[in-house]
Image (spheres, grey):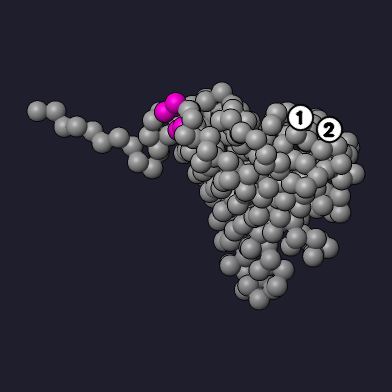
Amino acid sequence: MNFHESISPGRFSLLTRLSHCADYNSNRSSGLRSNMQARKNGDLGRGGLRAKGYTSHTELTKMTLKACLIARDAVSNMRELFTTPSRIAFLAIRDCEKELDQIERYIDEHLPDAITQVSELEARKLLACLKFITDLERIGDLVLGVAQRLQSRRSLPQRDTDGLAQMAAVLYEMLERIHAGFASLDLESATRVLRADAEVDRICHALFRKHLADSSARRSPLSFEVLLMAQALERAGDHAKNLAEELLGLIEGHTARHPPKRIPTL
């Protein structure tokens, strides 16, 4: 199977074809605010991911990079929902979540065979792909959950909307850097993602303090919804942090959680 020839033209719905546009920040009026063009040649066919033939480690790596873009696109569309309610943006998020599920199943199925035919370095990268897609799939689930809550609410207080949108903006940048870092094995990209996670936590904690300090807000169903959305975005940030730690491990040979032990000098 040729990775770049495996897409079926009928796989993408109209809303997804509309989202073949430039990055979110380049043109806010250009439809879905989604960079689907970057992955239009992916391995997603009408019936899901094709599973015939040998899958090389290169194809699995490219698929993981595409999954980074898909998760980023989901966050981009979620940012749109915070400012402008859009059924199209919601459907695009749902489509991204389904694609991430498909890629996770595909990698899980094909990685065991591919990893037995590669060098040690390539095997380490394939293991990173497996860990990457697990976290990316969870990010897709969390973003879809936030989008579903937004769809069920006509409006949120502006201050809450601003805080949640800020969290989404930071998460978008984290995933952008994860993609770039994994593509080029760039250490700086990984470390910047680790630092950005603290900003997601800070905004989340500020929202919690605001709502918990207000006795009337504590009894409000809307306040509860805002806190659930903030918690989901904070957890998505944690998954992006996991990706950065895995990237550091791939580059440096050890994970940020388990640095090499220092041998005491005599």
Q: Is residue 122 magenta?
A: yes
Left or right: 177 in relation to 37: left
Image x and y of residue 47, in percent: 78, 47
Q: Looking at the image, which residue is at 87% across and 41% down?
A: 10
Look at the image and tell me whether residue 159 can be seen: no
Q: Is residue 173 above or below residue 92?
A: above
Q: Is residue 158 magenta?
A: no
Q: Which residues are magenta?
A: 119-124
Residue 129 visible in image: yes
Distance CA(mark 1)–CA(mark 2): 21 Å
Asked if the residues shown at circle 1 and circle 2 are in contact, with their CB atoms under 8 angstroms apart, the answer is: no
Classify residue 196 by image quadrant. top right
Q: Main secondary structure of the magenta part?
A: helix
Outermost residue, left direction? 266
Q: Nearer the viewer, residue 264 or 70?
A: 70
Q: Is residue 248 above or below residue 219?
A: above
Mark 1 = which residue? 5
Q: Which of marks 2 and 1 precedes in the sequence?
A: 1
Image quadrant containing the C terminus: top left
Which amino acid type corresponds to the residue marked 1 in the rendered image?
A: Glu
